[in-house]
Amino acid sequence: MTILEFSLLVWAGSLIAGFLGALTGLGGGVVLVPMLSLLLGVDIRYAIGASLVSVIATSSGAAAAYVKEGFSNIRIGMFLEIATTLGALLGATLATRISSSAIAIVFGLVLIGSAYLSRKPRSKNEGEIPPDPLATKLRLNGSFPDVDGIRSYNVQRVPLGWTLMFGAGTLSGLLGIGSGAMKVLAMDQAMKIPFKVSTTTSNFMIGVTAAASAGVYLARGYIDPGLSMPVMLGVLAGSLLGTRVLVKAETKWLRRVFSIVIVVLGIEMLYKGLSGRI
Amino acid sequence: MARDRGWTDRRMDLVIGNLLRSGVVLSALIVLFGAVIYLVRHGHSPTEYRVFRGEPSDLRSVRGILRDALALRGRGIIQLGLLFLIATPVARVAFSIFGFAEEHDRMYVVVASIVLLVLAYSLIGSAWSA
């Protein structure tokens, strides 16, 4: 395969991954690395480096649109970014120390886990919970525009959320994914932050988290311009297209199909990792 | 208090949103420009990504990337675009520090500074000197 053919193929694949990722809210990063390493035979370390770059692009590209809606909470995001960036540094350092097979095994488990998380119904976090003293001290409680006026919310279990965020950051740095599913889990389930606020704030945090590990990847020579170029341009175009279509599309069956694809890729990664063929 | 916190937060959100979008657009354009040069010059060579060798040292550091990009090497220009992309969320955090300072929110000036320090440790600590 020539570089031109390869670039076009990777661009088209990344476009589809970014499109489906935005449409289903599951993110394109989770399928990118399996696609590059399983289907195109790219070394998993190059694949992770390229995926990390595309994660920054989609997160930052979508932020402008999210910000207008006024859901994201800048203080929650900033406070939890201490945890995710520290985790990302740890994850990126781990990635340079452990074998490709071990990375593939962790990746497989995370894929299966995130498909499971995406099937869980979103919780209804109502604002009646009394304020948590730590959250009040950190000024994390906020409000957002809901269908029937401004709704305020009180953030709960800050230490648990912070710890989960550290884990999400570690996975992001180790696997080159946004780990949005785990970030939303930490905010929505543990900290009882309303779902819309959780998802938009999580999107904000993804770019900063990925930037923390990108430095380590760049210095280690894991970010290849020839591979990252079609991945970044493809994912960016795909996700922008996806957010445009999102408003009109019926995504329920699409989410189901996409989570099946993710599980299949997860099993394949797990198998390749366990048999040492990656 | 003359300044309404909610309103200033909102304005900060909007400026940050635009900052992020401009950063992405700028880096995508640089990457695209590099891609054209790279594909025109090397498009017909065979690919090799199966075996991991790691990037040559000039594509691993800020100084090396700048040198390659100024020499109009396709891969160097793409890497420069990626560097801009990585810098975009960092700029966002740096801007937030000013935003919080304007709101006299000392606690969050500290919080944002810690995040910026971690990012600086990762980016300057590894990418500049390596």
Image: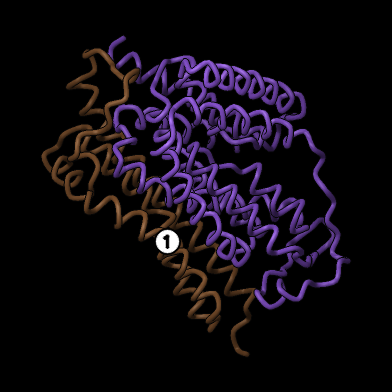
Chain colours: A purple, B brown
Left-right relation of B85 to A186 = left
Chain letter for mark 1: B
Report helix, strand or loop for mark 1. Answer: helix
Q: Is residue A75 above or below residue A49?
A: below
Where does the N terminus of chain A fall, quadrant-wise? top left
Instruction: Spot the residue most to the bottom.
Output: B1
Within 10 Å of disc 1 (Cα), the crowding (few <14, some 14-19, many 20+) is some
Q: Is residue A125 above or below residue A233?
A: below
Residue at (50, 29) in percent of width and height = A102
Name the amino acid, label 1.
Answer: Val
Left-right relation of A23 to A50 = right
Residue at (53, 34) in percent of width and height = A29
Where does the C terminus of chain A fall, quadrant-wise? top left
Q: Quadrant of residue B2?
A: bottom right
Judge by depth and name the residue closer to the eye, B61 or A19.
Answer: B61
Instruction: Spot the residue most to the right.
Output: A128
Left-right relation of A116 to B121 = right
Left-right relation of B28 to A268 = left
Judge by depth and name the residue closer to the eye, A162 or A63.
Answer: A162
Residue at (32, 42) in percent of width and height = A218
Residue B88 % position (x, y)? 40, 53
Q: Is residue A87 above or below residue A178?
A: below
Q: Is residue B2 above or below residue A186?
A: below
Q: Quadrant of residue A52?
A: top left
Judge by depth and name the residue closer to the eye, A203 or A173.
Answer: A173
Instruction: Spot the residue most to the top.
Output: A1
Which residue has dot 1 on it? B118
Residue A73 % position (x, y)? 64, 63
Residue A120 % position (x, y)? 79, 37
Residue A62 % position (x, y)? 54, 46
